[in-house]
């Protein structure tokens, strides 16, 4: 279930990432690699908050500061990695949007695993059963 929540948040983050990328690319202010970096940063800020609250359901008392440091360190590794893969894709694929999509898919599994085992570690909220026992909500 955690992976399903992770993918849902990543889809939203990807809309932000690709949206920023496309706006910058279309404005011709920056080249694709710079547009990729700016898109990743914007999506990363959103994803940190959403993954902490929704995906991994981190207890409020868990250290936001330490998780933020680990998350943005991971983002700091992900951005050059995805940019390197994007660069390689651009050698073979003329369309920067298609090249970016492929490079992002390549990086998805790695970032999930690192997020789960490196960033959002510690105490998590337990789901609470709601009437009927079928729906779950985050406990307080």
Image (cartoon, rainbow, N blue to C red):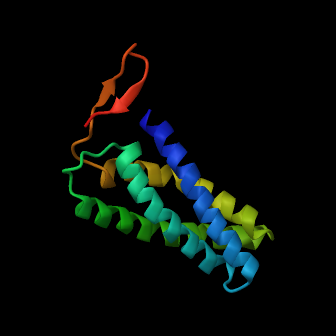
In the rendered image of this protein, does residue 39 appear above or below residue 124? below
Residue 137: x and y in percent read 37, 31
In the rendered image of this protein, does residue 42 appear above or below residue 61? below
Which residue is drawn at the image coordinates 47% and 53% (left, top)? 110
Name the foreground residue: 34 vs 78.
Answer: 34
Residue 72: x and y in percent read 37, 67
Q: What residue occupies the far top of the structure in this picture? A: 132
Q: What residue occupies the far front of the structure in this picture? A: 131
Residue 59 picture quarter: top left
Residue 86: x and y in percent read 64, 69
Query: Which of the image's four quarters has the C terminus?
Result: top left
Residue 64 picture quarter: bottom left
In the rendered image of this protein, does residue 4 appear above or below residue 28? above
Name the foreground residue: 9 vs 34.
Answer: 9
13 sits to left or right of 111? right
Name the foreground residue: 92 vs 26.
Answer: 26
Name the foreground residue: 20 vs 87.
Answer: 20
Residue 70: x and y in percent read 31, 63
Which residue is drawn at the image coordinates 40% and 13% (left, top)? 132
Which residue is drawn at the image coordinates 37% and 16% (left, top)? 131
127 sits to left or right of 24? left
């Amino acid at each position: 279930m955690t992976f399903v929540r992770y993918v849902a948040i990543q889809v939203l983050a990807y809309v932000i990432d690709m949206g920023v990328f496309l706006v910058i690319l279309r404005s011709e202010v920056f080249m694709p690699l710079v547009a990729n970096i700016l898109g990743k940063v914007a999506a990363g800020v959103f994803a940190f908050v959403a993954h902490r609250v929704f995906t991994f359901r981190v207890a409020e008392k868990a250290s936001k500061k330490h998780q933020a440091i680990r998350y943005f360190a991971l983002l700091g590794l992900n951005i050059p990695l995805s940019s390197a893969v994007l660069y390689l894709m651009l050698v073979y694929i003329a369309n920067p949007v298609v090249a970016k999509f492929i490079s992002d898919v390549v990086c998805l599994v790695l970032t999930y695993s690192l997020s789960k085992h490196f960033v959002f570690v510690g105490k998590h909220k337990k789901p609470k059963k709601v009437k009927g026992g079928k729906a779950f909500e985050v406990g307080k």
